[in-house]
Image: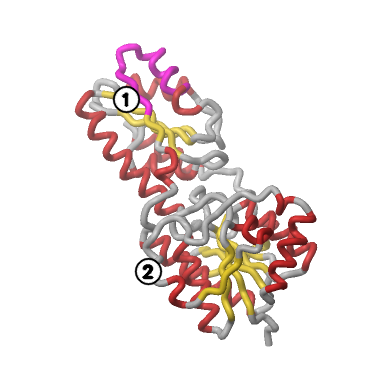
Amino acid sequence: MSHIKNIAVLTSGGDSPGMNAGIRAVIRSGIYHGMNMFGIRRGYDGMVQGDIMAMDAKSVANIIQRGGTILKTARSEEFKTLEGRKQAYENLKKHNIDALVVIGGDGTFTGASKFIEEFDIPIIGMPGTIDNDLNGTDFTIGYDTAINTVVDAVDKIRDTAESHDRLFVVEVMGRDSGLIALRSGISTGAEAVLIPELEVDYDAIMKRLDKTRKNKASRIIIVAEGDKEGGLVVAEKIKANFPAYDVRVSILGHIQRGGKPTCMDRVLASRLGVAAIEGLLEGRKGEMAGLICGNVQFTPFSKAIKHIDKINTNLTRIVEILSL
């Protein structure tokens, strides 16, 4: 029988669509299992400052469809210090909190691992990041919404590109991961996709553009922000090779983080929220709840954190084949 009676949830790192659905699932699942539930505002910073509040089923009513996070998120320099983490632990003890559910990515799980090591408090993680760059889950919460936002934006950009015979370089989010760029590139019919995981073969790109320039009224190049040179430099290189091209750059930026979560992200967050609570009650800690091949699985934080350094080359091959 689990000794856990009081559980708190927080969101940390960059916000991602579906975090609210995850918060809702954690709170209501905990209540269903007879737990007292709490929310921590502004992530680890709120834990250090003692910004902790009791939550009930009504606290999470009408949030499943909302982007962002009702609990807010923030960086915490104090939590990186032992003194800060001690203060955070003392604040949890004041509320008799026995366990945590943390929703976030790489930095969130790194902080959770350190906290477990020092204070032996059970923590289960949920993968909340638009980059989809964690091991232990096929998709992270927010990724599907983010790529659909990119697809919608690029479809609109292509309308004006076709009207003016323009080439657009579209820069999307992905500082360390090119998965947003790669999947959105395939789904929008991009001529090329540039990602941080692979060296850019500019000669091949220029040959491809030269080969197709007479057959297309519009061309789209997708560039992940983590690419070594970025969208503006890529555009300059294309312009230098093809002076006659009307080359424009569109940097999508933070619109990719916002918006209503898709059905997929809402269901994913809901499933993982329930799994997180049940994992804690089963005695798990230091693990991330994820979904692999349709089934919930738990992965230790040490294995979940940023171990994806290989890209599916079949996806890059598809871009090349379909760019004719």
- Within 10 Å of disc 2 (Cα), the crowding (few <14, some 14-19, many 20+) is few
Residue 93 placed where, x, y %?
72, 72
- Within 10 Å of disc 1 (Cα), the crowding (few <14, some 14-19, many 20+) is many
| Residue at the image position 37 percent from the left and 52 percent from the top | 259
Q: Is residue 284 above or below residue 302?
A: below
Quadrant showing the C terminus: top left
Q: Quadrant of residue 61?
A: bottom left
Q: Nearer the viewer, residue 293 or 15?
A: 15
Q: Is residue 312 above or below residue 109?
A: above
The secondary element bearing badge 2 is classed as loop
- Residue 147 shows up from this direction: yes
Q: Which residue matches tag 1?
A: 167
Structural distance between the alpha carbons of marks 2 and 1: 42 Å
Residue 250 placed where, x, y %?
37, 31
The secondary element bearing badge 1 is classed as strand
Q: Is residue 36 above or below residue 293?
A: below
Residue sticking out furthest to the left: 163
Q: Quadrant of residue 112?
A: bottom right
The amino acid sitting under disc 2 is Asn
Q: Nearer the viewer, residue 43 or 90?
A: 90
Magenta segment range?
233-249
Q: Which residue matches tag 2?
A: 62
| Residue at the image position 68 percent from the left and 84 percent from the top | 2
| Residue at the image position 40 percent from the left and 66 percent from the top | 64
Q: Is residue 306 above or below residue 261?
A: above
- Residue 304 shows up from this direction: no
